Amino acid sequence: MKTSDFATTHPSETSQKATFAVSKLRKYMALCGAMAVSILLASGNATAKTHPSYLTQSYCDGLVDQFVDYGMRSLGKYVNENFNLEYKGGIRNTINFLKQRSEWLSECDSYLNDTASTSVFHDEKNTREIFTAIDALAKELQLVREGVEFPDETGVNNPLPFIKDRYETLATLMDQHHTRILMKKQFQ
């Protein structure tokens, strides 16, 4: 049986509906596939920690060395020689310095924990103690900046002994860390 030219050039209504349904089904499947891929990618990123590309073992070691050497020396000079209750700008700058270094070192600690299973300062306990000491010194300075008074035995506002005590705690912890580093280098 021979089909007419009209039938081959003009598809029937049923075949048009079928073609339309198949086209819709393909679009729906493509959309579902795209959604599934995006969900998989999103869930993969949600569980994996990502770190900035500049974080390396060398960068973190350099950051720690800089804080142990220059940072602590500068902080010591400020606390022991230049601290003045009247100059709130110096106090603000020191608080910002401590917060910034704490953030940087914390970022390195997180990176080292994830990639090398180590801590930024010798071990997890020492790292926590050092971060606590940094935060305590910054908090004490912030109280001074806000005008909280620290009366001495004569009743005069004198926050310096409190600031020095917080600094000494941090300096002792940093000195212990520095000693461990020197001993480690000696036996390498």
Image (cartoon, helix red, strand yellow):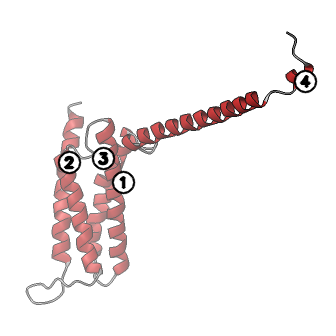
Number of residues whose C-alpha sits closer than 10 Å to that of mark 4, classed few (under 14), some (14–19) or many (20 or more): few
Task: Judge from the rendering whether residue 148 lies leftward or rightward of residue 17; answer left or right.
Answer: left
Q: Which residue is mark 1?
A: 104
- Label 1 or label 2, whichever comes before in sequence order: 1
Label 2: how many Cα within 10 Å (few below 14, some 14–19, many 20+) = many
Residue 109 circle label: 3
For disc 3, the neighbor class at 10 Å (few under 14, some 14 to 19, many from 20) is: many
Please name the residue shown 20% across and 61% down the image.
133
Residue 166 point in image, percent of width and height = 18, 67
Q: Earlier in the sequence, mark 2 or mark 4?
A: 4
Q: Name the N-terminal-most of marks 2 and 3.
A: 3
Q: Amino acid at mark 2?
A: His
How far is mark 2 from mark 4, CA to CA?
91 Å
Q: Amino acid at mark 4?
A: Phe
Residue 112, position as x, y percentages in the image: 31, 41
Task: Tell me residue 44's x, y (percent).
Answer: 42, 38
Name the amino acid, label 3: Asp
**Circle 1 Cα neighbour tier, 10 Å, few/some/many (<14 / 14–19 / ≥20):** some
* Precedes in sequence: disc 3 or disc 4: 4
Q: Secondary structure at mark 1?
A: helix
Q: Secondary structure at mark 3?
A: helix
What residue would you read off at disc 2?
177
**Circle 3 or circle 4, nearest the eye:** 4
Mark 2 vs mark 3: give the one in front. Answer: 3
